[in-house]
Image: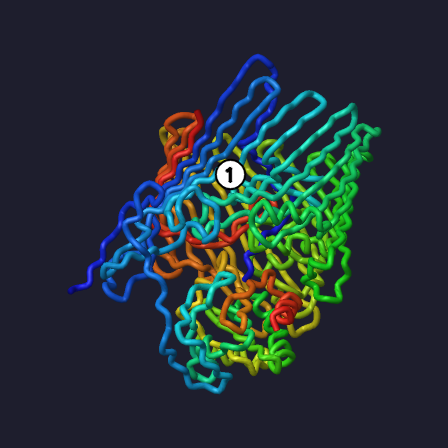
Amino acid sequence: MLVVLLGSGVASAEDPVQASAADDPTTTSVVFNDDLDLRYWRVDERLPDPADLPVFNYVEQVNRLNATVVSGRWGLAMQLDEVALLANRYVLDGVLYVERDLVAAGTPSLFPPGSDVYVNLEKIRGSFETKIATVQLGDTYVAFGRGLALNLNRNVDIDIDTSVQGTKVVLRPGAWDLSLVAGQANRQQVSQDIPNDEIYGDLRHAIAGLRAERFGLGPAHVGAHGVFYNFVDEPGWGPGIEGIGTGPDVVTGGVTTELVGVGGVDWFAEGDVFGYGPDQPSPLGPEAPDLGYGLYASAAAYPGAFVVLVEGKRYFQTERVNATLTPELYEVAVAPTLEYERVITEDSSAAVNSNDITGGRVQVDWAAVPGELVPNATVAVFRDDDLTVLHFNDVPETIVHPIVGIEWIAAETSLLANVGYRWDLRDGTAGGADRHLHGDLLLHVPLPGALMGAVSLYGEWFRWGNNPLQQSDYYEVETGWTLLYGSRLALTAYADQTTNPLVNSTGNIDEQTYAAIELQVKPAPDWTVKAFYGAYKAGIRCSGGQCRRLPGFDGARLSVVGGF
Amino acid sequence: MPRRVLFALLSAGGCVPQLYTTVPPEPVNDWDAPVNSWTLSEPPPGLAPEGYEVGQVVPDLRLPDQFGEEVALWQFYGSVVLIDIATLWCAPCQALAEDAEETWEDYRDQGFVYLTVMQENLEGDPPEPEDIELWVENYALTSPVLADGDKVAWDAIKNNAYPAVLLIGRDLVVAERIDPPTAETVREAIEGAL
């Protein structure tokens, strides 16, 4: 299946490259953060002769160094990535063989072609900030409204980091915020979570956007924005710059309205229109219109001990803007999907990436015992009329997904638990329904002495509807058992099992069972050292509105993260 | 001389002189024609396989078809070939297959071949003959469908994503990697190459 990225909301924007003005203009600060990862990969592949030597095992070393300098209103930040492969080649009968190419042919590199080392100054940004203006030159991040039209942020959980390399100017005159961004997409080359191989250069898509917001119109905040995209087919600076003159491939425009505390409710609404050029084929087919639109609204109320959140969406050809980028594993526009990210599967990813979907979600949290016991319930209902690309179903379907959960805190004991059932009912009787039962739990309990125990459990049982090429039903179980000593020491044992045939990894206990152990030490507040040995399974991981498929791992891993 | 395998424990190509040369692919001077029912045209002698990148001569994939006969990719020299590397379980592969037969029929008279290369069955395992038959019957295909359980064509896959769709020119050079691979983008690419 296509490895597509999914959206369920505005992605988090953790930005260690942030350079902001200091309150005291006379001080200068210099901060470094380093993330070193050393991985020993065990590979099952063997040569025909000799067949007993693990020739293809190798070591991957990745380092990410972030440096930030702030002096008064000026700032400079950069990120330097480096990756090296060791034991990546062998000699057989006098002939040297390279097991994998770290860098794809034609990719610019400081090192000769065929090298097992790659270094990249991935991000760099200079900034100047006052109370009414911020100017950034270099790599910047941006999101307009709830992200339907433009949402490029750094997602540390799944190691997606695509910035706009160019200019960002924010003016704050009075009750206004005016944002202008223009530049080219700069995708992160080096990954710290997935194996690095065939690193290729950037397709520098042109992006330009403008947003104006007016605050304090009574309880209302309003905004309007426009975004232009021009996508390129070839890597390098040239195609990106030439593309600017050929006209945009996609033009979006949108408005947002926020009302705070009106009728005791916080309201938000956003509407965006997408105009697609002839070079942007629609997944819905050649008869699909060249326009798309997205509508999102939410209402949050706080009656008594309850928090009630109601959200609705209507998206038609909004994912089409991301279709060109699927091989590059990121999205430029990430709209709220209203889905429970933890349980997104190959099947439910179709609805998350749908180009024709309508739905809503209601979530109720009840502070039964404030600060101690908060049960919650959620129900989401969607109508998905898209049958293309990721959809296995041949007819439209109605999705119903209730979830109940609880958050319980009592002194040093805490419990977070959720149970849900997702039901994808296909129109008519022939298609049946995909059914997904899932549950997750995180429990912390105090133990004698200064010890604390933590248990993390996740389970799911998935049953397919009726497909012409019928897949197998499956279950998955993930467990983690942790012993903590204060905040500086943690020992965790993992055990996973899956019967999902689409999981592209093999267990180290048996084909379906994985086990591992990890020791985490914090020698200082800003330093974390982790040592991992064992295996974990492949799967989809979602965070902050985007998802990606992560491969499994079998081997040993050492990571050191620290700041100075 | 007994075969020996040495490990290179440290390789930092930028810091040490290159003490070796990699072996270039061997040119094929005596091409062995397979026996099957499909179009067969001998490639020029001395052609050397290069890879699956655009501009490279595609390797001579040799895989069994739905009739159990060996098919060689190079036997289609002189035709425009669309290689659709797929799995039975993937939804976009199934979506693309819906139009495969019609695409094959529309362009075959102009020297076009639609070649499906199946790498996994519904369980994610190497496809058996009955899995190929299931695919052929479900989509009513009369074009070649090859079983690649050993994933000989794995190097054509990018980012573990299926389907991987390549358009090969009449000279067996990769003309285009079609992304995203939809019925429309596939037809557009084929018409541009014919």
Could one spot residue A531 in this view of the protein?
yes
Q: What colouring does the structure picture have? A: rainbow
Residue at 50% of width from left, 34% of height from top?
A: A79
Query: Within 10 Å of the Cα at label 1, are there few (<14), some (14-19), or many (20+) other Cα atoms?
Result: many
The secondary structure type at the circle numbered 1 is strand
Tell me if B90 is positioned left or right of B16 in this view: right
Residue at the disc numbered 1: A122
For the N terminus of chain A, give its image quadrant.
bottom right
Tell me if A430 is positioned left or right of B82 in this view: right
Give the tally of numbered discs.
1
Q: Nearer the viewer, residue A545 or B46?
A: B46
Going by the numbered disc 1, the residue's amino acid type is Glu
For the C terminus of chain A, give its image quadrant.
top left
Q: Quadrant of residue A430?
A: bottom right
Could one spot residue A377 in this view of the protein?
no
Q: Chain of mark 1?
A: A
Q: Quadrant of residue B74?
A: bottom left
Q: Nearer the viewer, residue A23 or A380?
A: A23
Q: Position of residue A473 (x, y in %)?
A: 51, 66
Q: Position of residue A380 (x, y in %)?
A: 68, 52
Q: Position of residue B92 (x, y in %)?
A: 59, 65
Residue at 28% of width from left, 55% of height from top?
A: A90
Q: Nearer the viewer, residue A516 or A437?
A: A516
